[in-house]
Image (cartoon, grey):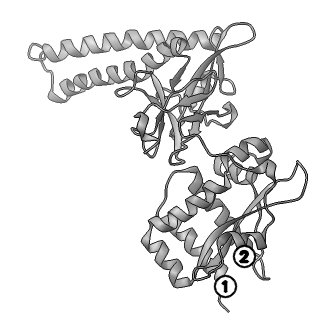
Amino acid sequence: MKNNHLAVFSELHDQLLNYPRDTLWNKYLSIIVSEQLRKIEYSDDGFKPEKLSRQRIYAKAKNIDEKSVDSQTAKNAVKTTKLKATLKAFIDDHPDCKKAFINLGYKPIIVTSASGGGSKNKTLLWMDIQTIDSEQSEQEQIDKLATVEADSDIEEDEDLSTITYERKATSDVKPSLFTRLFFKQGELKMMSFKGIVLMLLLLLSFFLDILIAIYAVFVVMLMNEIPNLKLWQAFLYAILIPVAYLNWRYFFIPLYMLPYHRVVKAPMFFANINVVNADIEMYWDKDKLNVARVTEFTATCPICSGVIELANGKPDQKQPLVGRCREAPHAHVYSFDRMTMQGYFLGVADYLTG
């Protein structure tokens, strides 16, 4: 006998892999359908859904410990109405996916329920299937499968003009070898021995950049006057000029601006090679001394649910750092305030109402 649940979930799982998008909502869908497939794989009985809490879904998407996720944070991040809309939009936007479900005669739907009465009830989510030619509405099927969410769990419409940033814990950031030499558990007190050594290294790199650039320029200018100078040697000296510039631009300047801007993108050597995004933040400790820490500021784009990360404001913005969506870095742009952890839309005013 054909297992319709297995066929529908497998098809959705494959389609999500074929059309990947780096958004939290697509990650949520992948997590939910993967858990349903895992439950079917290890179950000999009929379909019994794997019911997931918002905290569990959010923790898996962020790759963090579920116990560290606050219930309110998960509620704000995993909105069931947006999740259902994302699933519907994904199917409608991909003809191959829509055609596959039409051939199967079923389509996947998101189902929600409350685990019990009282103020401490948790909303559980899972995935089920619905016949495509059924005249019964999806809401009627949900009412049969699950209880209606409590009034206290009603979701509000998301404001597309503002975002809330999250600061990753230093323990969750993968340090580079250079960072481990100076930073203890992702933090460095600037007036400590290692902090002073790093500042001296910074000054040394600055003077070396100047000396290397001057030396290389003179060698290239006077190469006809230098006896026995070979072409490969002249080329090697010429290469030193852009190397000195890169070191000055991407190592010295970011660290030099850190005390003034308080947050900078992690310069080269500070971020692990496997990490695509990392920031360095400077704050005052209890003794009013500067402490630098490696972290990461991110937010969820309310427009497309992509990941927003800090990036250079130039050339289209005045601020040194702004939040740019990975999926639309020039259209979905927000301000960044490290004190309030809020951001406001910086694009065309009519964009959000279009």
Quadrant position of the N terminus in the picture: bottom right
| Residue 97, above or below 281 | below
- Residue 40 is labelled as 2
Image position, residue 30 (x, y; %):
61, 61
Percent of width and height locating residue 43: 78, 78
* Residue 309 or residue 158, whichever sits in front: 158
Circle nearer the N terminus (2, 1):
1
The image shows residue 304, relative to residue 348, as above or below, that is below
- Depth order, front residue of 76/28: 76
**In the orientation shown, which residue stands out farthest toward the right?**
118
Q: Secondary structure at mark 2?
A: helix
Q: Looking at numbered disc 1 in the image, what kind of residue is underneath it? A: Asn
Left or right of 273, for residue 219: left
Crowd around label 1: few <14 · some 14–19 · many ≥20 (10 Å): few
Tell me the SS state at disc 1. loop
Looking at the rendering, which quadrant does residue 209 occupy? Answer: top left
Nearer the camera: disc 2 or disc 1:
1
Q: CA distance from mark 2 to mark 1?
A: 10 Å
Camera sees residue 15: yes
Residue 3 circle label = 1
Q: Position of residue 338 (x, y in %)?
A: 60, 23
Apparent side of residue 161 relative to residue 290 in the rendered image (left or right) = left
